[in-house]
Image (cartoon, rainbow, N blue to C red):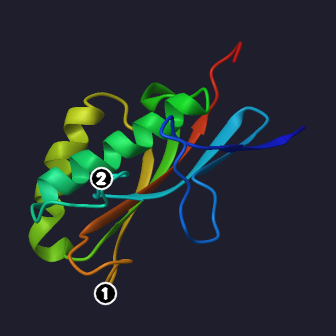
Amino acid sequence: MSRTVIVPPTGLRPGIPYSPAIRWDKLLFISGQTGSDPVTRAFPEDIKAQTRIALDNLKVLAEAGGASFKTALKMTIHMTDMLNEFAAMNEVFREYFPKDPPSRTTVGVAHLARTGLKIEIDMIAAVKDGV
């Protein structure tokens, strides 16, 4: 089995020591993606918008690694305000996973990497056959 680093199509790598995703055999491990634009690093204030951006970032990395949301197995969501924003996050999550969503853990955290970020999501997915 081989270990392969997966980067998004932009080729951008984080400036800190971690890989965007790692493919190991038929599994893809995607590092936490926040609700910020991967190029500009800008982000909206709204939890729904940040959730969409985080999920879109995950989708791009999943596809780059030969997986998809249909093959998502497990997600972990970190939120800075679960009390007030959990329902709104779930509303957006349901748009991306309307049927048979992956297993998931959602935890509240005091803060994320930058002030104003509200959500970070990581994912484990199976790689599609033939990829």
Location of mark 2 (residue):
37
Q: Position of residue 20 (x, y in %)?
A: 57, 53
Q: Amino acid at mark 1?
A: Ala
Q: Residue at x 50, y 39 (%)?
A: 61
User: In 3D space, how far apart are the residues under numbered discs 2 and 1 (Cα atoms)?
Assistant: 22 Å
Instruction: Compare residues 5 and 93 and report the one nearer the observer.
Output: 5
The quadrant in which the N terminus is found is top right
Residue at horizontal 44%, vertical 35%?
A: 60
Left or right of residue 101, residue 42 in this image: left
Q: What residue is shown at x 55% (from left), y 42% (from top)?
A: 11
- The correct choice, above or below, for 112 with respect to 48 in the image is below
Dot label at residue 110: 1
Question: Can you give x and y, in whole percent of width and height, for residue 33 in the image?
Answer: 41, 56
Horizontal placement of 52 versus 25: left or right? left
Above or below, comparing residue 10 to residue 19 in the picture: above
Query: Residue 53 or 104: which is nearer the viewer?
Result: 53
- The three-letter amino acid code for the residue at tag 2 is Asp
Q: Position of residue 89 (x, y in %)?
A: 19, 55
Label 1 crowd bin: few (<14), some (14–19), many (20+), radius 10 Å: few
